[in-house]
Amino acid sequence: MNKVLFILVMAFSLTSYAQKKSLDYVLLSGKIDNLKNKEITLVKTNRTYKKILSVNSDGTFKDSMKIKSGFYRLITDENKINLYLENGYDIEVIANANNFKSSFKISGEGAGATIYLGVKGKISGKLRAGVTSFYELEEDEFMNTTKKIKTTLSYVLDTMQGISENYKALENRNLNHSYLYQLSRYKNFNKNTDEVSQELDQELKKIDLSNEEDYSFSSSYYTLITKYYKDQIKELVKKDSLDLGLASMKTYAEISNQKIKNELIYIAARMGISHTKRLDAFYETYMSASTNKKNNAKITEMYQSIKRVSEYKFSPKFNGYENYAGGTNSLDDFKGKYVYIDIWASWCGPCLGQIPDLKRIEKEYHEKNIEFISISIDQKKDYDKWRTMIKEKQLGGVQLLADNSINSQFMRDYAIVGIPRFILLDPEGKVIDANAPRPTDEKLIQLFNKLGI
């Protein structure tokens, strides 16, 4: 390790405290000067925990909480800092809101892990010299740099004071996962990478795909194993001619660790259940694999909603949605015509990507027996954005605003969790396709031609 890095490590090490056995909760206290908002937010980075901490008029605060070990974000006004917390930590934070990062100091039992995070960022930045140029390095130089980052950080971690042995073990494995993640990224940027490919393939074979601790601790580990399973899903789709949703259920159902299985299969089920062509098999496979009652209840609700739509044939209805042109509309207003519904929002990038083709098709079918309805799920706070975007992009068709964003009953009835989403109804209001092709998909015009629109 060079002299600069050694001095940096020692400076941070001297400010850390030895870990002691004490509390069965986290005690977080400190003082932040010049706060505008007299409260602090503590949020787990995976958003499974959030707490508001009150701040006294002089900027001091003190609170205790039982938490799950992991990475948290301390948010004050517009400032953010990452912390690592475990029950038993007694941490004090000092900072000035006007120059938060440069004035930030942390001390107390358990502070060493957070101090290490700061050192880690500085060292990685020095050795990488920028993300863009990092992935443009020649293969040998890239391999040397990534290995140097891993070995340097491992040395820093092992020699710093005030860090629990549990954290050191987790982070040392995380450093290896991060190393492999960087190799996979480089392989994607540079296709002809023999040395990287061989190293990556060899090391990936050694990874335990069911390590619950690493799954919770390491974002790099999470990325590596989710990519592994996505590759398995693609192979299953190709091999057994399954639709993507059912292939996902079958793949995730085989995961040996129940916690990892529950989380990954739920994420896939929530996003895929409304798109699968084999709804019953999809649902049965999910339910036989998942043991999380809360998640199962949500998927069951979605399954029942989709089932009702498919069995009753007639579309669920919306009523009294605000029309950009004035007044309100309900679905019944459009009976007698085919109806192509676009569920979108002003903040949705993929939705905006569909607009040019949607406008083109609207113009082409303007005199036909079809109504193009765009329903925005923008929240009330984005009302002006919705109206401005319609005006600036000169959006055609019927522009409506849902009454309760994504939680509108119409969205719940169709089990919509992701947008854009397109729905095609016949003149009687029956569902032709609850997952109609997008405007950018040539299959949409083929469907229109088949229906004789």
Image (cartoon, rainbow, N blue to C red):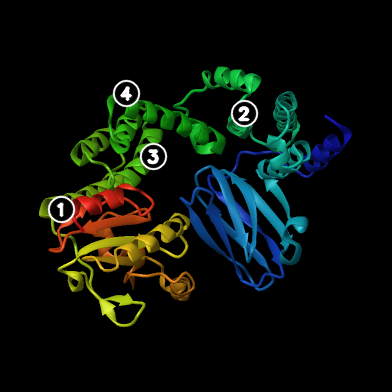
**Could you tell which of marks 1 and 4 lies nearer the N-terminus?**
4
Residue that carries the numbered disc 3 in the rendered image? 263
Amino acid at circle 4 = Lys
Residue that carries the numbered disc 4 in the rendered image? 239
Q: Secondary structure at mark 3?
A: helix
Residue that carries the numbered disc 2 in the rendered image? 183
Q: Residue at x 27, y 37 (%)?
A: 286
**Residue lying farthest to the bottom in this orientation:** 326
* Residue 250 place in picture, x, y as percent: 30, 30
Give the CA distance from mark 3 to mark 2: 26 Å
Amino acid at circle 1 = Arg
**Could you tell which of marks 3 and 2 lies nearer the N-terminus?**
2
Label 4: few (<14), some (14–19) or many (≥20) C-alpha neighbours in 10 Å: few
Q: 250 or 44, which lies in front?
A: 250
Amino acid at circle 3 = Glu
Residue that carries the numbered disc 1 in the rendered image? 308
Residue 314 visible, this orientation? yes
Q: Secondary structure at mark 1?
A: helix
Q: Residue at x 56, y 61 (%)?
A: 41
